[in-house]
Image: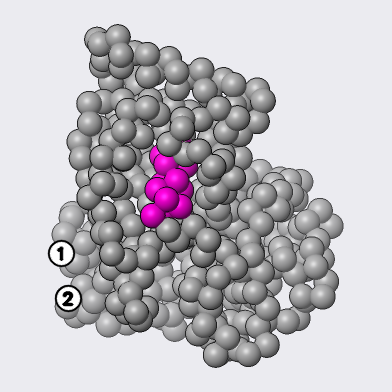
Amino acid sequence: MPLRHLFIDMNSFFASVEQQDDPTLRYRPVAVIPTDAPTTACIAASYEAKAFGVKTGTPVWEARKLCPKIVFVVADHRRYVIMHNRILAAVRSVIPIESVLSIDEMSCRLMGDERTPEKVVTIAKQIKRAIRELAGDYMRCSIGAGPSVLLAKVAADMKKPDGLTTLTDADLPHALHRLELTDFPGVGPRMEKRLKLHGIFTVSQFCEAPAKTLADVWGSKIHGERWFRLLHGEEVASAPTRRQTVSHSHVLPPELRTDAGSYGVLMRLVHKAAARLRKIDYWCGAVSVGASFLGAEPRDSVWWEESVRVPRCQDTPALVAAAGRLWERRIRDRTPFKVGMVLSELVPARSATPSLFDEDRQGEDISHAMDTVNAEFGASVVYLGAMFGMRDAAPSRIAFTNIPDFDRRVS
């Protein structure tokens, strides 16, 4: 099958941005953290840090133990988005981008003579050069090419950093056999366990498995057939999706690990989520609130969560009231460490029935007026009293699958 897709994966993106912007960090182990606190965890690590075993999710205390010379840098999300946009411009100067899959991943469709291995190598080198020129000499990427987006992504992962791999008919499927099952996007530890329960222990067995076996593994004939076709290099159209939730969470900085501080941050998150809900023109039917509370030891931490259904709405006053009622049920004898909330049971506005009561309509009018003022004069210029004093708390964070939104209505 021809090489139809090119996949670009930026290497250690967040840490590389820090090393690009601060030359003193280059060639040193660097970890990016959400807040300057010993109880937080790394959200990204440079290749120099990865060599010591530091990775996403590694607690700060453990990272220091693994790599005593590691440098911790608090994330600067706006700079990451700026760099993301520079990289998009660099790639587009060479080839159109078909899909932006995350802040550090994108795919391009190959057309005509672009599908030859020789032309792919030329295009990949041009992309790497354009990124160095427009984004910086320390910004590196790995590029893969294959007959499907899945296999192009797998190819990009095969050589890091700064790699280039093509998976042609001559390479498939034997080039995949040296991989682990979890090297395939969508196959995590739980799915690996299910594959093994069905007698699939190696990638060779995975590629040779019939569609019926894969259907049994995934518990779905549709998913089994889809994976069978993807593994054999066929293009499979993605099923249309609908937004399921809008959510925010935030690890509390030490000074806000109090009852009042955690409540204020939670209300800030509700404000942001409600504004996002209006921006994407959805209504929600349920609200969930959660928090983790510290114990004497990290393993003693406790997660608490409560949910409630609400009449279909998208206005901030109603959602703040619902979240406030849920918060009254929280654990009260422990120190809060992280708060989060989720708006679920979403429906598009065109499918929602607005309330007939005047007080509900007033909440909607107030919310849209807040959005208008904030868009014009700055983020959170107008807000409800529940988040008083927390205007600058819980700033937009890195989103690995969604680019952080700095729209002033939702920031």
The residue shown at (36%, 70%) is 294
Residue 261 is one of the magenta-drawn residues? yes
Name the foreground residue: 124 vs 84.
84
Residue 41 visible within the image:
no
The residue shown at (26%, 71%) is 190
- Report, in whole angstroms, how far the alpha carbon at label 2 lies from the one at label 1: 8 Å
Q: Which disc is residue 198 wearing? A: 2
Q: Main secondary structure of the magenta part?
A: helix
- Left-right relation of 87 to 98: right
Query: Is label 1 in a helix, a strand or a loop?
Result: helix
Question: Could you say where residue 53 lies in the image, as x and y percent from the top left?
Answer: 53, 86
Q: Amino acid at mark 2?
A: His
Image height check: is 259 above or below 231?
A: above
Name the foreground residue: 351 vs 260.
260
- Left-right relation of 75 to 175: right
Circle 1 residue: 216
Question: Could you say where residue 250 lies in the image, as x and y percent from the top left?
Answer: 46, 55
Badge 2 vs badge 1, beta-carbon distance below 8 Å: yes
- Closer to the chain start, of discs 2 and 1, is 2
The residue shown at (67%, 60%) is 120
Image height check: is 74 above or below 298?
A: above
Residue 266 visible within the image:
yes
Query: Quadrant of the rendered structure where residue 124 is?
Result: bottom right
Q: Magenta region: which residues?
A: 259-271
In which quadrant of the rendered image does the C terminus lie? top right
Q: Residues within 10 Å of mark 2 (few under 14, many from 20)?
A: few
